[in-house]
Amino acid sequence: MKKFLVEFIGTFFLVFTVGSTVITPGAGPLAPLAIGASLMVMVFAGGHVSGGHFNPAVTLAVWIRGKVETKSVIPYWIAQLLGALVAAWVVGTIKASGAAQPLVLASWRPAFVAEFLFTFALCWVVLNVATSKGTAGNSFYGLAIGMTVMVGAFAVGGVSGGAFNPAVATGISWMGLSSWGNFWVLVSGEVAGAIAAAYAYKLVNGND
């Protein structure tokens, strides 16, 4: 139960930060920095309890990697999605008027590619810094994970919204920051990226 609570809390603050910084007045062009930092501190705070996934795609990749029990996967996902929905609700109760316009995709392909690439990058980094024997006991894993999300948000946030996380995709759709019509594009890219990263890790590292 403790690890599921940690996943709820970490995902809540990640999605809450996304909503609070993107919705006006927000943090403007520095929003990706705040979002990456939010993930970083939550990973440092909860990584020793739950692994600090805060992302159903990361949980999927870690499960394929063999570092989370099958029986824990769905509870992880439930905790993460509940954290995202509660965060979206809280943002909706306190946000200033004049919310940002929802992202409308001109084409699904660029958004799919963007979500695939940086979800791959995120899961690849998580697997290498947080589950690998070669980096066991390191002190930089939270920074590496948070910075990956920050880089992705700066690089392709204007293309796909920069979710890289089905829980974040759910939260931004609920908050009206992304059209629900985009949801399948985001999530399919994220799932594909997670699976590809997990098998790439296993190809490079073997059974580790």
Image: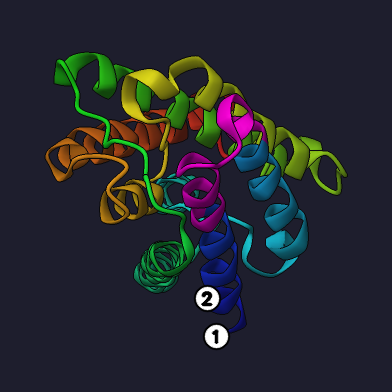
Is residue 149 visible from the viewing direction of this image? Answer: no
Q: Residue at x 27, y 39 (%)?
A: 178
Mark 1 is surrounded, within 10 Å at the Cα level, by few (under 14), some (14 to 19) or many (20 or more) other residues, namely: few
Left or right of residue 123: residue 73: left
Judged from this view, the residue extending furthest toward the bottom is: 1
Is residue 169 visible from the viewing direction of this image? Answer: yes
Q: Is residue 44 magenta?
A: no
Viewer-proximal residue, 21 or 8?
21
Name the residue carrying label 2: 4
Residue 157, compared with residue 135, is above or below; it is above
Q: Quadrant of residue 6?
A: bottom right
Secondary structure, mark 1, is loop
Specify the quadrant that holds the C terminus. Answer: top right
Left or right of residue 10: residue 181: left
Specify the quadrant that holds the N terminus. Answer: bottom right
Q: Residue at x 61, y 82 (%)?
A: 2
Q: Please, what is the three-letter code of the amino acid marked with disc 1?
A: Met
Q: Is residue 30 magenta?
A: yes
Residue 79 x, y percent position in the rendering: 43, 72
Mark 2 is surrounded, within 10 Å at the Cα level, by few (under 14), some (14 to 19) or many (20 or more) other residues, namely: some
Q: Quadrant of residue 205?
A: top right
Judged from this view, the residue extending furthest toward the front is: 97
Region rendered in magenta:
15-33
Q: Which mark is drawn over residue 1?
A: 1
Q: Please, what is the three-letter code of the amino acid marked with disc 2?
A: Phe
Viewer-proximal residue, 161 or 127?
161
Secondary structure, mark 2, is helix
Residue 11 x, y percent position in the rendering: 52, 60
Please report contact status of discs 2 and 1: CB closer than 8 Å, yes or no.
yes
Q: Residue at x 30, y 17 (%)?
A: 113
Viewer-proximal residue, 129 or 26?
26
- How would you classify the magenta stretch by its main secondary structure? helix
